[in-house]
Image: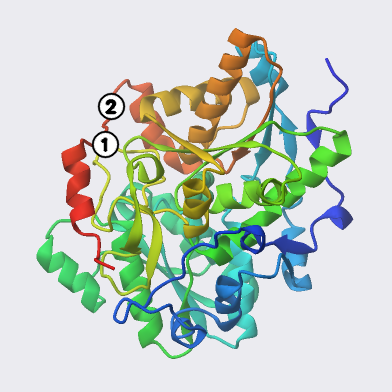
Amino acid sequence: MSNIPYKTYLEESEMPKQWYNVRADMKNKPAPLLNPGTHKPMTAEELSVVFCDELVQQELNDTDAYIDIPEEIREFYKMYRPSPLVRAYCLEKALGTPAKIYYKFEGNNTSGSHKLNSAIAQAYYAKKQGLKGVTTETGAGQWGTALSMACAYFGLDCKVFMVKVSYEQKPFRREVMRTYGASVTPSPSETTNVGRKILAEHPGTTGSLGCAISEAVEVAVGSEGYRYVLGSVLNQVLLHQSVIGLECKAAFEKIGVKPDMIIGCAGGGSNLGGLIAPFMGEKLRGEADYRIIAVEPASCPSLTRGKYAYDFCDTGMVCPLAKMYTLGSGFIPSPNHAGGLRYHGMSSTLSQLYDDGLMEARSVEQTSVFEAAQFFARTEGILPAPESSHAIRAAMDEAIKCKETGEEKTILFGLTGTGYFDMVAYQKYNDGEMTDYIPTDEDLAKGFAGLPEI
Ligand SMILES: *Cc1c(COP(=O)(O)O)cnc(C)c1O
């Protein structure tokens, strides 16, 4: 066995003091958000009706490569960061691969995922602006939980619209959020105009992220002292998540290792964008090269089968338009989909990087994702979130390829969270009842038909 430790931790004093903004090094900048009425780029003034002022500045900042992490946020980070960079010795051995596999584990906080990295930043800026509270949506519940924790820390009110199917399937998630003081409303609900409209058009709908976003935005805009916050997709969220990649890079430097390949799951793109940020920066500046792979569900394949176009970010079409790889805002994954990562679009930063050929994307089917999750749990001991398991699947596949070719590649993947609230999905897999569904071209055509003409 080599002298690389199982876990590489940074000292608290070695934690990043600045976030890294990859847009500063991109030649082709991500396309701007557009006003859905005028189709002109959203101004800071327009965005500040919906979002906190400082976050608007971060959203629009394509030039500053480094942005200071406020001391208050660093103090909070210290409760659960730096997160470990783990050498997956047991997984390597079980696979019999010459590849060296590392993962960055972001599930070591109560919310169980990386989402807390941005939640605490967004809550901090809301507090600093003197707001009373924030509204948001949550799907599987990790973002809502993270935001509830962050709002409790800063004494902010937190209103969460939770996709109805998750609200019903994950009562414990809901109770965690309520324990931290958030109010949780199943979406679509009768409490908003857009919710009532969606319910009238689609009675019995189990909801979607796009729909919950519309409700949360409506409440934020209509309530004095409130703003809306979002846990993925936006530039600002990728910025906050760069703490993951920066810590990885520092930890690798400590042990004198350089990854060949960086793999992450992609829902809206925040963990992947954060994990790859400093490595992509080196690639953009021509200082180093890495293979970067985004992994998405075959049932919600926005990068691998989507269109690169301006689209609505939400079902109610109240949010700005974003240019991204998208399946159309009306796309809803098939009901048997259990693995998360169900947003119809993708971060516009990652979309641009992908379109420029700077990263790859692949899709994987959910039974093979859960097979990888189970293998990982049995070898490395951590019960992974289904979302994270997309990255595990791809990392294992690459390691198995190395076994065939004899190459000793160094693979890094993002282990974004734990799967304790996903046991209904695990149960389906364990009972042999999980199925795969890959949308047909006709299924996808329906979503594309709803793309706005810009
Ligand atoms: C939300 C979530 C994701 C996907 O979101 P991204 O913005 O694409 O990172 C992945 N893993 C876990 C555990 C999550 O909670």
Residue 169 or residue 231, whichever sits in front: 231
Q: 431 above or below 314?
A: above
- Type of amino acid at the residue the image marks with label 2: Thr
Pick the quarter of the image with the N terminus: top right
Classify mark 1 as within 8 Å of ligand 1 or not, answering yes or no.
no
Residue receiving disc 2: 435
Q: Are marks 2 and 1 in contact (CB under 8 Å)?
A: yes
Residue at point 26%, 36% (across, down): 336
Residue 215 or residue 343, whichever sits in front: 343
Residue receiving disc 1: 336
Residue at point 39%, 38% (across, down): 339
Colour approach in the figure: rainbow
Q: Is residue 445 left or right of residue 117?
A: left
Residue at point 81%, 42% (across, down): 251
- Type of amino acid at the residue the image marks with label 1: Asn
Q: Is residue 210 left or right of residue 280?
A: left
Residue 200 or residue 259, whichever sits in front: 259
| Percent position of residue 261, x then y | 64, 32
Mark 2 falls on what kind of element?
A: loop
Residue furthest to the bottom: 224
Q: 57 above or below 337?
A: below
| Percent position of residue 148, x then y | 53, 65
Can I make out residue 413 in this image? Answer: yes
Q: Is residue 57 left or right of residue 315?
A: right
Q: Residues within 10 Å of mark 2 (few under 14, many from 20)?
A: few
Residue at point 81%, 55% (across, down): 15
- Residue 297 position by quadrant: top left
Q: Is residue 386 left or right of residue 56?
A: left
The mark nearer the N terminus, 2 or 1, is 1
- Residue 338 position by quadrant: top left
Mark 1 falls on what kind of element?
A: loop
